[in-house]
Image (spheres, helix red, strand yellow):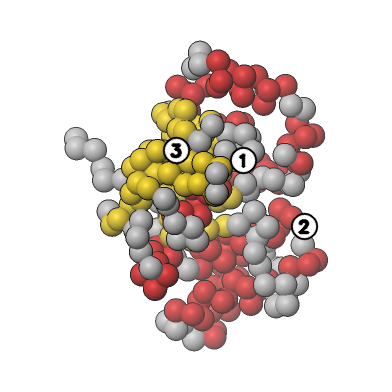
Amino acid sequence: MPEPTPYIAFEGVSKAFGALKVLDEVSFYVNPGETLCILGRSGVGKSVCLRLIMGFLHADAGRIFVDGEEISQFTEAQMESVRKKVTMVFQNGALFDSITVGENVAYALRESGELNEEQISTQVDRMLEVVGVAGMADSLPSSLSTGMKRSVAIARALAAKPEAILYDEPTTMVDPMMASLLGDLIQRLKGKLHLTSIVVTHDVRFAQKLADRVLFLHEGRAHFFGSCQEFEGSSDPVLRQFLDLDRWNPPVLLATR
């Protein structure tokens, strides 16, 4: 069988901020319906990869592809079509604090102009049920826990009917139980909707649950790119140190990493 065309791909992508080179000729790909987890220590460019895909930043060199189309030099106007296919769940949820949970989820539905208000209300309730926060439509985001805000942010992302979702540190500042629930949700969405996903995380156990492939960034480079099994079984000293440190972190620390 021929290899599928990757849905998202980096080819020799570099990005610097002044004298600091964050990404140095990084290459990887994600096939349609697969989940890639990007691992590495803080400050190695994991979240920068997501912002490059969304067009919030532009690469200094290399090529970025989404759905077979090179987007590296796209203007802000051209990126609008990409953002209809690819959406991002930010670490802080990025919800509108002044409107209710239901209104946050309804925002993308109203933008499309395809549904009337009764249909939007039905869709909102369904989305909130899917992500495990049914009955919270009338609540304000400020009344929710960090984990619940992430769930609502995922519901809002799903409302746009994307083909791919990018998750930026979804388990940061949540307790282990909520981290597990978020992992179950991301896995379920992949299975039901065949969504292509990229998950930025520090947490090896979270990656083990989700990843078809792992990208490990180290000193600006793609130090490892391959299956989760290959990653876990690697004898590379940099990977072994990272894995050993993660293994010795007590579960209670997962909430603050």
The answer to whether residue 9 is seen in the rendering is no
Q: Amino acid at mark 3?
A: Asp
Q: Residues within 10 Å of mark 2 (few under 14, many from 20)?
A: few
Name, please, the residue furthest toward the left. 1
- Side of 207 relative to 91 (left or right): left
Give the residue type that dot 1 points to. Gly
For residue 24, which numbered disc appears in the image?
A: 3
Q: Residue at x 28, y 57 (%)?
A: 69
Q: Which of disc 3 and disc 1 is earlier in sequence?
A: 3
Q: Amino acid at mark 2?
A: Ser
Q: Is residue 235 above or below residue 82?
A: above
Q: Quadrant of residue 103?
A: bottom right
- Residue identified by numbered label 1: 43
Disc nearest the viewer among 1 and 3: 3
Residue lying farthest to the top in this orientation: 235
Q: Identify the residue under disc 2.
A: 145
Q: Which quarter of the figure is the N terminus placed in?
A: top left
Q: Earlier in the sequence, mark 2 or mark 3?
A: 3
User: Which mark identifies residue 131?
Assistant: none
Residue 209, image x and y in percent? 55, 35
Element at badge 2?
A: loop
How packed is label 3: few (under 14 Cα within 10 Å), some, or many (20 or more)? Answer: many
